[in-house]
Amino acid sequence: MAKTLRRLITALTAAVAAVGLFTVAPANAATDDVSPLVVGGSRARIADHPWTVYLASSSGGQFCGGTLVSADKVVTAAHCTRGRTPASTRVVWGREDKQSSAGVVASVTRIWTHPSYRSATAGYDVSVLTLDRDLASPYLPLATPADTALYTAGTNATVLGWGATSSGGSASRYLLKATVPVIADTGCKRSYPQYNSTAMVCAGYPQGGTDTCQGDSGGPMVVNGKLIGATSWGKGCASAGYPGVYARIASYHAELAQQIAS
Ligand code: ARG
């Protein structure tokens, strides 16, 4: 694309307040290639990301995302499960369209929240749900402390969820995905003084426009077929200079692996 055209698109994009990555409503999918508001989000096939699940209340309302990491374990964010009981929580697997009845609605028998969790911005934003049944593979493997390369600045990560399609907007009916580059710890610290490079990893574009948003929390951030992050927090969604922050899965590998094995 010509540089001037790119600049124009960037300017138009910036002109629209808080354009979420997931701004592209599915209804606009056919016009993705001509709309200046298309900033990178697109429909994702559940079959291509079968370990992507969502958390729902007992009445069925989706409120967070998660990742199936073994037959009966889901990794999500601690702020998604805080204050919830297993009885009030469901995991929906294999359902790309929230308005369909595809897939399986599993019940939750146990919720483990990281014992040091206090708030998302203070870190430890991870939890593990145990399901009442076994779900089919594939399961997404966790990044380990040896996977430092997956966190290198500039690495493209895939983020997925059914969350809001703009800051303050409503949640998506369909599973959406976006690609966001991992940002260096120094850059993230400049955006957020409370950023902790052990507990978190952040990703996004300097100009914003592409991001996770409310309702995507707990959902997967994937690099090279491994879970490297869980959607955690950010200032607004997709705003320039304020990337998305994700729980750094590799830092919690030992505790998560112990929960997954138990
Ligand atoms: N805390 C939000 C949730 O509960 C996720 C926010 C992610 N924000 C962002 N700018 N990436 O769904």
Image (spheres, rainbow, N blue to C red):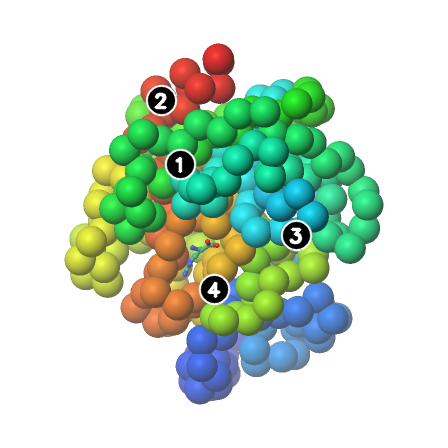
Label placed on residue 247: none
Q: Secondary structure at mark 2?
A: helix
Q: Is residue 83 left or right of residue 182?
A: right
Label placed on residue 61: 3
Q: Is residue 259 left or right of residue 198?
A: right
| Amino acid type, label 3 | Gly
Residue at position x 23%, y 59% in the image: 192
Mark 4 or 3: the one toward you: 3
Q: Quadrant of residue 113?
A: top left
Relative to the observer, which residue lies in front, 72 or 25?
72
Q: Position of residue 215 (x, y in %)?
A: 53, 55
| Amino acid type, label 1 | Val
Q: Return the disc, 4 or 1, that comes first in the chain's sequence.
A: 1
The residues tagged by marks 4 and 3 sit, at their Cα atoms, a distance apart of 25 Å
Mark 1 or 3: the one toward you: 3
Label placed on residue 126: 1
- Is the residue indicated by label 1 positioned so its CB lies within 8 Å of ligand 1? no
For mark 4, does the 10 Å Cα neighbourhood hold few (<14), some (14 to 19), or many (20 or more) residues? many
- In the picture as drawn, the residue positioned furthest to the right comes out as 101
For mark 1, does the 10 Å Cα neighbourhood hold few (<14), some (14 to 19), or many (20 or more) residues? many
